[in-house]
Image (tube, rainbow, N blue to C red):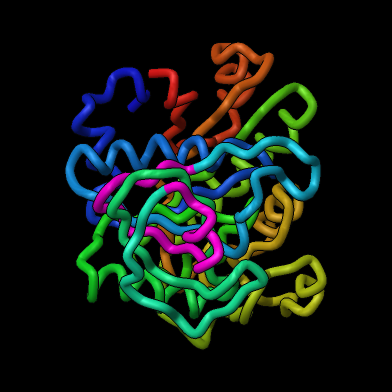
């Protein structure tokens, strides 16, 4: 269903009672802007909790120096950040939980906002640590609607939070159009893999499915079993070539909620025409913040 035809209630409730990751196709794709928009949807119903993966605590991107959008936290929100970032913020907070997780920007904590302000996020680097943080938000503090700002081009953390889903944000211009459409095709293809239980009749790949592992697949094998779509470390052309020879199944199904497409210098009608025969059947949301 196109975003324009959805009711405000439908837009809001896609983020309620679930953990939603926001992933992107590159640095400065607009994940933080989308995250701010999603947080405002949740606040129509209840206070949200939000976090990031790893360190996001700079006013300017360390790679290209571009100014980064800040996140506004409102009274009642729960945030995951570091002690240093709490002191730096113009908001006021109470620390609900301090974790034995330390970064160059301070110790990781969960804080509740008691006076609104801007906040820079710092999160755990490892999936196991992220799960511990989300579990505490869910079970100890009662926050059920959580948004996590994911690292660029990194989907693997979705696997560590049962029942979570993700949006993949694609910032597209003429320079990266072909590459990004192929990445969208890859993800759409992976979401269609059948979920099955482990079976000795299947050749199982533990960990990442990389190009270097393809030569080890037995020639008489007809079915390949991987953990989930985050295990696929192939490009679209490599995956298509592999699927001409064998079928791929997954142990776990991840919930891809949709693509968020930000078009720059490309008309929406032209983009839709370019993907019309690409079998991208996942929902696409266009520039949600302008609506």
The reply to whether residue 226 is visible in this rendering is: no
In the picture, which quadrant includes the N terminus?
Answer: top left
Question: Is residue 86 toward the left or the right of residue 134 in the image?
Answer: right
Indicate whether residue 77 is drawn in magenta. yes
Q: Nearer the viewer, residue 171 or 118?
A: 118
Vertical placement of residue 194 versus 168, above or below: below
| Residue in view at x 38 percent, y 46 percent | 73
Percent from the top left, x then y, of residue 252?
43, 70
* Residue 8 location, quadrant: top left
Position of the C terminus by quadrant: top left
Part of the protein shown in magenta: 71-90
Q: Is residue 282 left or right of residue 97?
A: right
Rendering quarter of residue 79: bottom left
Task: State left or right for residue 118 relative to residue 23.
Answer: left
Q: Residue at x 40, y 73 (%)?
A: 133
Looking at the image, which residue is at 24% across and 50% down? 47
User: Is residue 131 or residue 192 the one in the foreground?
Assistant: 131
Q: How many marks?
A: 0
Which of the two residues, 41 or 60, is positioned nearer the viewer here?
60
Residue at position x 56%, y 23% from top?
A: 276
- Height in image: 276 above or below 220? above
Q: Nearer the viewer, residue 238 or 288?
A: 288
Magenta highlight on residue 36: no
Q: Tell which residue pokes out farthest to the bottom in this image.
A: 200
- Residue 273 % position (x, y): 59, 17
**Whole-percent x, y for residue 159 in the image:** 47, 68
In the figure, 54 relative to 202: above or below?
Answer: above
């Amino acid at each position: 269903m196109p975003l324009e035809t959805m009711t405000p209630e439908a837009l809001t409730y896609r983020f309620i009672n679930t953990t939603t990751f926001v992933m992107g196709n590159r640095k400065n794709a607009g994940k933080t802007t989308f995250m701010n928009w999603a947080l405002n949807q949740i606040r129509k119903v209840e206070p949200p909790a939000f976090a990031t993966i790893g360190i996001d605590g700079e006013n300017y991107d360390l790679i290209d120096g571009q100014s980064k959008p800040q996140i506004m936290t409102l009274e009642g929100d729960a945030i995951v950040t570091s002690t240093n970032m709490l002191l730096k913020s113009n908001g006021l907070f109470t620390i609900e939980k301090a974790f034995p997780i330390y970064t160059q920007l301070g110790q990781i904590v969960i804080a509740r906002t008691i006076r609104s302000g801007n906040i820079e996020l710092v999160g755990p680097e490892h999936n196991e640590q992220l799960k511990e943080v989300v579990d505490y938000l869910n079970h100890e503090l009662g926050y059920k609607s959580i948004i996590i700002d994911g690292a660029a081009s990194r989907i693997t953390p979705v696997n560590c939070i049962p029942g979570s889903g993700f949006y993949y944000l694609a910032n597209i211009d003429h320079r990266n159009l072909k590459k990004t459409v192929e990445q969208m095709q890859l993800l759409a293809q992976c979401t269609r893999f059948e979920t099955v239980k482990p079976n000795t009749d299947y050749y199982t790949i533990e960990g990442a499915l990389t190009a270097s592992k393809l030569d080890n697949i037995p020639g008489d094998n007809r079915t390949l079993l991987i953990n989930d779509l985050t295990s696929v470390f192939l490009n679209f052309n490599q995956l298509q070539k592999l699927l001409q020879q064998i079928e791929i199944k997954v142990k776990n199904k991840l919930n891809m909620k949709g693509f968020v497409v930000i078009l720059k210098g490309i008309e929406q009608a032209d983009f839709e025409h370019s993907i019309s025969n690409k079998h991208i059947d996942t929902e696409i949301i266009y520039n949600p913040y302008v609506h």
